[in-house]
Amino acid sequence: MTTMRMITGLFDNRDEAERTVQDLVASGAATLDQVEVHAAEPGVPDHHQGASLRTLPMPPEEHHIYAEGIRRGGFVVSADVDEAHVEAVTAVFHRHNAVDLEARQHEWRGHGWFGWQEAETDRFSTYGGDAVMGPRPDPDARPTRVR
């Protein structure tokens, strides 16, 4: 049985997100069916932006961070890939400037953002700063943030 991992990253603009998707597919690490792009939806109030992220397997505080990135004009790319492709996918995310979430949160907090108020960090392990990785489809899986 193949283990699948969901790799997720925040990008500051559409071009970076689109180039990431193109490179994932061109490299053979993912197919278009395995990749999702989440962005702001016209006409949706700010506090509801990023609602589509709820389908991704990550802790609630990660959803909140990515949703804030979308609310601020960013794009979230997620790829559901075979575990054997995790390093290649992570390299593509880095090459196209996936945001360092820890640094970005620090920046946002410096401008008054409160962030997630109720972390459940005991259920999830993290590593690094710009992508979250977790098995699919097990909802109790322990995703890992990849830097």
Image (cartoon, grey):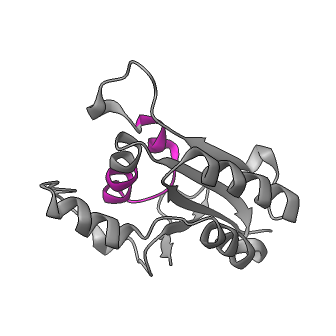
The span shown in magenta is: 51-66
The residue under the point 64% across, 45% down is: 36
For residue 89, which quarter of the picture?
Answer: bottom right
Q: Position of residue 43 (x, y in %)?
A: 39, 18
The residue under the point 69% across, 69% down is: 92
Q: Position of residue 45 (x, y in %)?
A: 30, 25
Which one is nearer the viewer's eye here, 20 or 64? 20
For residue 28, which quarter of the picture?
Answer: bottom right
The majority secondary structure of the magenta stretch comes to helix
Viewed as shown, does residue 46 lie left or right of 126?
left
Per the image, is 144 magenta? no
In the image, residue 71 above or below residue 84: above
The residue under the point 12% across, 55% down is: 112
Q: Position of residue 13 (x, y in %)?
A: 53, 49
For residue 95, which quarter of the picture?
Answer: bottom right
Count of numbered badges drawn on the protein: 0
Which one is nearer the viewer's eye here, 142 or 73? 73
Residue farthest along the top direction in this orientation: 43
The residue under the point 53% across, 65% down is: 98
Q: Position of residue 58 (x, y in %)?
A: 45, 58
Viewed as shown, does residue 141 lie left or right of 71?
right
Specify the quadrant that holds the N terminus: bottom right
Per the image, is 54 magenta? yes
Which one is nearer the viewer's eye here, 3 or 22? 22
